[in-house]
Amino acid sequence: MIVKTTWKDNMEFDSEINGHHIILDANASVGGNDKGPRPKGLMLTALTGCTGMDVVSILKKMKVQDYKFWMEADADPSEEHPVYYTKIYLTYQFEGDDLPIDKIKKAVNLSEERYCGVSFMLKKAAELETKIIVNGEEI
């Protein structure tokens, strides 16, 4: 995997991965123009994307269908430089009728413990706290 990141102007960079482009930028207080996300935020995006793809794939194999699914990730930053995430909060949210709680728990667990390489890497640097919410109730 090769990622090419090119400086454009001020704090703006264009990062190319597999033919796709992502603009990264900083906010105005540090010289940017807020044209794109910050790099640390993209780590949370990578986490939700990685585990989300796993969960959807596993649930499909388990014949679970007709549901809505999204994730939210938040993180506590360290107080001194280098600023890094000390704790990451990951919430899996599902909505649907008669959803099989046991299969949802298993899919999330398999992703976090076996398949998602991003989870694996981030757990080496930060505590990861997970919640699963089905139809508005934590399970």
Image (cartoon, rainbow, N blue to C red):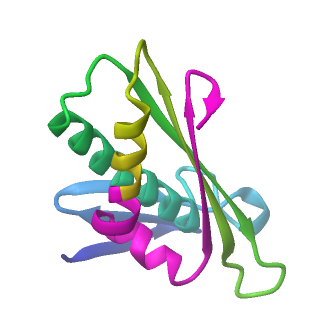
With respect to residue 114, does 33 lie above or below? above
Quick one: which residue is furthest to the bottom in this view? 81
Percent x, y of residue 88: 63, 63
What span is colored magenta in the figure? 110-139
The residue located at (52%, 52%) in the rendering is: 36
Image quarter of residue 67: top left
- Residue lying at 77% horizontally and 78% vertically, measured from the top left: 78
Which of the 4 image quadrants contains residue 5?
bottom left
Where 67 sits versus 90, above or below? above
Look at the image and say whether residue 131 sits in the magenta stretch: yes
Question: Would you say residue 111 sits in the magenta stretch?
Answer: yes
The quarter of the image holding the N terminus is bottom left
Which residue is at the far front?
102
- Provide residue 84's location: percent of width, then percent of height: 66, 78
Side of 30 relative to 36 (left or right):
right
Q: Position of residue 53 (x, y in %)?
A: 29, 47
Residue at the image position 58 percent from the left and 38 percent from the top: 139
Residue 7 appears in view: no
Taking depth in this image into account, of 64 and 2 the one nearest to the observer is 64
Is 102 situated above or below 88? Answer: above
Residue plotted at (61% across, 77% down): 126
Q: Position of residue 17 (x, y in %)?
A: 24, 64
Total labels drawn: 0
Of residues 34 and 42, which is closer to you in this image?
A: 42
Residue with the most extreme top position: 97
**Relative to 92, 66 lies left or right:** left
Q: Is residue 42 visible?
A: yes
Task: Choose between 130 and 79: the one closer to the eye.
Answer: 130
